[in-house]
Image: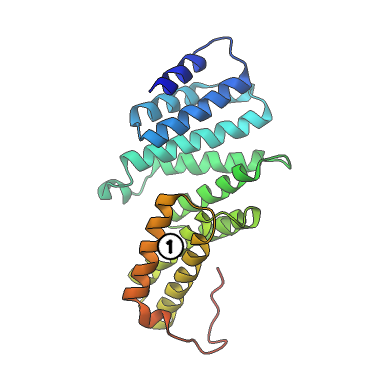
Amino acid sequence: YSLMNALKNIISNPIINENDYMKSIGLYIDESCDKKLISEVNYVINILEKLDVNSLSEQNKLMYHLFISTAYSEKYDLTIANNINEVWKWEQILIEKQILNLRIANQLKDDNIDNNNLTNIFTNLANRYNNIGRFLYSFDYWNKAIEINPNSGLPFINMGNTLAYYGINYLNENKYQYAYIQLAHHYLNKGISRQLENDVIFQVKEKINHLEKEYKYILDFVFCKDEFNINY
């Protein structure tokens, strides 16, 4: 906790300049998320919600909305994501706040925005739209993330997981179920060949192995040419 305590001291310094303040906030969020500390996530959310956003430079306004959306996302993951009763509630305030701030960040972007930040905006928007069942919006934003950074593996992985989930659980007509599962396998393999964290690689390999074991008959199925078109 020594780094977090040092960052707290920097953040609470009344004469700190704006850029150093925002940089320290970003590092504090990263540490809080890495350590899964809900108390510290709430601490930084409280600070950001009280901040006068209009006083910030345009670049720091964008970073503000990225930072607070990240904090809301972590709070959701730590408090709601694994609680089935909460996940299925109609009103999802934390997801709504994430989407709102990510959309504002997207509006604030300019030609100088870092590609990693832009990729994060699109990927996170896609993930949260997917959380609330906005399937087509999700794929639009994942594809935008891929256009910006074709080497990022997460958009491919997220598309693959989503297609697999819908294909396995919701589609009864064979040709659509087969197409979704084949596309899922395709995107998961695309994702694993790109930039990913080691723990994500392990999870994706397990998913691919599961599909190849349990749904081999589907993956081996050959469609008639031009039978139908699904293009995600």
Can see residue 164?
A: yes
Q: Residue at x 57, y 25 (%)?
A: 22
Q: Which colour scheme is used?
A: rainbow
Number of residues whose C-alpha sits closer than 10 Å to that of mark 1, classed few (under 14), some (14–19) or many (20 or more): many
91 vs 179: above or below:
above
Work out whether residue 202 or residue 179 is closer to the camera in this orientation and state it.
202
Q: Residue at x 34, y 27 (%)?
A: 39
User: Can you give x and y, in whole percent of width and height, for residue 222 in the image?
Assistant: 47, 86
User: Can you give x and y, in whole percent of width and height, for residue 147 in the image?
Assistant: 64, 57
- Residue farthest to the bottom, as pictured: 224
Instruction: Count up the numbered dots.
Output: 1
- Residue farthest to the right, as pictured: 111
199 vs 215: above or below:
above
User: Can you give x and y, in whole percent of width and height, for residue 216 in the image?
Assistant: 36, 79
Which image quarter is the N terminus in?
Answer: top left
Work out whether residue 8 or residue 137 is closer to the camera in this orientation and state it.
8
Instruction: Say what secondary structure mark 1 lies in.
Output: helix
Q: What residue type is labelled 1?
A: Thr
Can see residue 170?
A: no
With 214 as the anchor, is 114 left or right in this view?
Answer: right
Which image quarter is the C terminus in?
Answer: bottom right
118 vs 185: above or below:
above
- Residue beneath label 1, please? 162
User: Can you give x and y, in whole percent of width and height, for residue 141 in the image?
Assistant: 57, 55
Q: Residue at x 57, y 43 (%)?
A: 103
